[in-house]
Amino acid sequence: MATETQNEPETAMRNRDLTVTLQPLERLAWNFWWSWAPDGTEVFRDLDPGLWQQCEQNPRALLAQVSDLRLAQMAADPTFSGRVRRLTERFDTYMSDTRPSPKLNVSARITRENPVAYFCAEFGVHNSLPLYSGGLGILAGDHLKSASDLNLPLVAVGLFYRFGYFRQRLNREGWQEETYRAALADELPLQSVDDETGRPMLVEVSMRGRLVRARAWLADVGRIRLYLLDTDVAENEEVDRLVTGHLYGGDRETRLVQEKMLGIGGARLLRKLGLQPSVFHLNEGHSAFLTLELTRELIESEGLDFAAASERVRERCVFTTHTPVAAGHDEFSADLIGKAFGNWYETALGLSREEFLALGRVNGSSEEAFGLTPLALRMCHSTNGVSRKHGEVSRELWQKMWPNRSPNEVPITSITNGVHPGTWVAPVMRRLYEQHVGDDWIERARDASVWAYGVERISGEELWQAHSLLKQRLVAFIRDHSFDARLARGESEDFIEAARTMFDPAALTIGFARRVAGYKRWDLLLSDPERLTTLINDPERPIQFVFAGKAHPQDQNAKAVLQRLITWQRDSSVRHGIAFIEDYDQEVARQLVQSVDVWMNMPRRPLEASGTSGQKVAINGGLNFSVLDGWWLEGYDGDNGFAIGDLSDLTDDEADRGEADSLYSVLTEEIVPRYYTRDTAELPSQWVAMMKRSIQTLVPIFSSDRMVAEYAERIYTLTT
C-alpha cells in the first residue's frame, strides 16, 4: 500500500518547536488551501513581509527561515495568534466536510474509490509551485480548486519539472533572456509517495530502448490530491533524469518522452496507488498516450483484442482541446514515434506499425505525422472546446476526421472556461462581497439573482474607494518593481530614478498581459505611436499602460516586438506612463487583474480559444476592452465593457488595420470620456455603473465552480 511521507529538510525541522499558538502554521503550509482561503496568504505574509517576498511566497521556506525573534514576537501577539487559530479552524472544518456540494449533480459512478482522474502537462496552483507557463496551467489549477470546493471526487496527475518554465530577464538592449532555477522538492509542500517498504514508489516506462523510472510527489490542493511524476532519480541514466527537467523545453524528442511519461507513467502510477478512476479527463492532448496504456491493460488482463479493448477505454475517457489552430497541436514524425516506442505497439497492443501510426493520423496517409489530438479524438468518448466559439472552430478544424459529416455534426461540444473566485479576488473586494452579497458569496457564485441584488447594494462610493485602494497598491508595485529591474540592468541613472515617480493612481490605467505571440497582436497598440503618445500625455485625461508577458525562447519575432516596446518605454516623453513588468507569473497577474481600470485584449479572431485573465479582472470590478473572441464573445453585452472591432469577416491585414483604428476610436470616444466624467461628488458614476454591471453579469457565469459543475453534469456522466 502506498504511503505519503513529508519530506522535511533540516532547516524546517526546527520549526516543530514553534509555540502552541503558531504550531498550526506548519500544518497549514502543507496544503495549498491557504492560498485561496480568506486571510490565508495574509497570515503567512504578516509573519515576515520582506522574507515572504524573498521566499517567493513559499510558506514552508518562510517557516524554515524566519528568525526566532520574529517568531517570538508574533507568538506573543494575541491578534495574530487569533488569526492563526481562526484560519486553522476553518481549514479543519473544510477538510472534514466530505459532503458533495448540493449544487453539484455527480454521476453515481464517480466516488472516492472511483474518482475522476485529471491529467494535464502543467498545473498553476500557486506561483511558489512553478509548474506552469500560462493559461492552460492556470486553468488546471483553478479546476482543482473548484473540484475541491465542490467536493467532487477527483485526483490529478502531472509532471514535476525540476527547472520549471523559464524566468524572464530583459538586458540593456531590451532583449529577452531566459534563465532557469531548480525547484527542490524538499523546500516545497510536496510529500514523497512511498511504497510499503518506505522507499519512493517508482513507475517504469520503456522509451528509447530502455526503462525510465519516475518517482511521485504529492501536493495537497484542498481536498484534491495532485500527483507529480519525477524522473530525476538515481536509477536513471543522466539524459533520462532530464525527461521531467524543463516544462516545454528541449527538442521534439524530449516533448515526446515527456508526454509518454505523463500518459503511460501517470496511468501506471494510479494503478500502483490502488485507484480505479471511473473517468479519465485529458486536459489537452499531452496525456493522450494514457488511452493506449489503458487499452494495453485490458488486452493483458482480459485477453481482448485491440478493437474491443479500445472501445472499453473510449467509454471512460474525455478530452478537452485548447488549441484553435492545427499548427498548435503536438505532432511527431513516424521515425521519432518508432524511436520512442520501439515495437511496443506490436507486443503490447497487437498492432502493426501502420495500424499504430494510423491512430494518430487524420486519414491514415503515410505522409502524415502522428498527432496526439487525432489520437485523443479517436480514443475518447467526448471532446469539448473551451468556449462556444472555440467549439465551433474545433468542429471546422477537425471535420476532416469525419469527412461524411457537416461541421455542425462533428461530435465536439464546448464548456467555457472560468476562474476560481477565491484565488483571484482582492481582499478588499472580498470584504465588499461578504458585506453585501453574503458571507457565502463564493458558494453562491453561480446564482445570478443573488449577484444582481447584492452588487446593487454596494454604494458607488464604496466600490470606487475599494478600487482606488487597489490602484494605489498597483502603482506602488509598479514603481518598486521597475526601480529594481532598471537597477539590475544597469540602466541610466535618470531612468532608474524616474521609476520612483512613474504612474499616477488617479489616471486611467490599462493592463495588457499575456504571452508575446503573433496572434496576440502586441504590436497593434504600437501601430500609431504618435497617437498613443498623445493619449499618454493628455494633460487633463491621461492614459497609462502596464504590460507583462513572455516570448517563447525560440520565437525571435516575438522577442523583437517586446524589444520594440521596451525601447519605446525609455523615451522621456512616455516613460512616466508605460511600464513593463518582467517575469510574468501568478503573483504579477494578481497585482494587475485586481487593480487596473481596463483589461485590454487584442487577439486575431478566432484564435483566442477562451482566455481567462479578463474574467479575473471582472471579479475585481475592472472592465474588459477586447476583440469579440473567446469568452468575451459570450460575456459582452454592450454595457459591461468595451469591444474592439466587430464580427465582420476580414482578411488578417484588413482586421489588423480596422481593429487598430477601432481600438484608438473606442479609447478616445468612449473609454476616456466615461472614466474622466465626474459627478458633483467627484465620483465617475457612469464608470462605476459599468463596474457593477460587469460584476453582476460576468462573475456568476465565468467562475470555475460553474465550469467544473458543468463538466460533472455534462461530460463526466459519459452519456452520449
Image: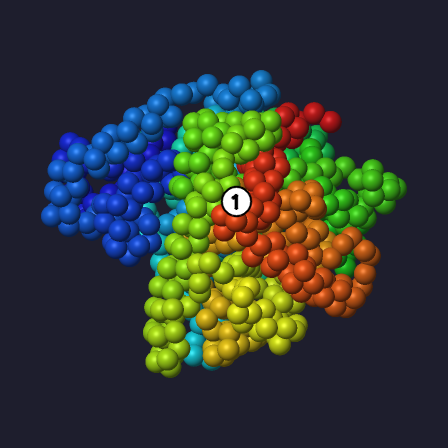
Count of numbered circles on the image: 1
Query: Hey, which residue is sitting farthest front in the picture?
Result: 680
Q: Position of residue 666 (x, y in %)?
A: 68, 59
Residue 473 seen: yes
Q: Is residue 361 above or below residue 317?
A: below
Crowding near pointer 1: few (<14 within 10 Å), some, many (20+)?
many
Q: Is residue 399 left or right of residue 252?
A: right
Q: Is residue 25 left or right of residue 676?
A: left
The quarter of the displayed image where residue 435 is located: top left
Q: Secondary structure at mark 1?
A: loop
Camera-side residue of 305 and 715: 715
Q: Residue at x 22, y 31 (%)?
A: 82
Q: Position of residue 70 (x, y in %)?
A: 15, 47
Q: Residue at x 35, y 64 (%)?
A: 480
Quadrant the C terminus occupies: top right
Label 1 amino acid? Gly
Q: Position of residue 168 (x, y in %)?
A: 44, 65
Q: Residue at x 75, y 48 (%)?
A: 393
Q: Is residue 82 above or below residue 284?
A: above
Q: Coloured how?
A: rainbow
The quarter of the displayed image where residue 557 is located: bottom right
The quarter of the displayed image where residue 474 is located: bottom left
Residue 153 seen: no
Q: Residue at x 33, y 38 (%)?
A: 40
Camera-side residue of 479 and 244: 479
Quadrant the N terminus occupies: top left
Camera-side residue of 215 and 687: 687
Residue receiving disc 1: 621
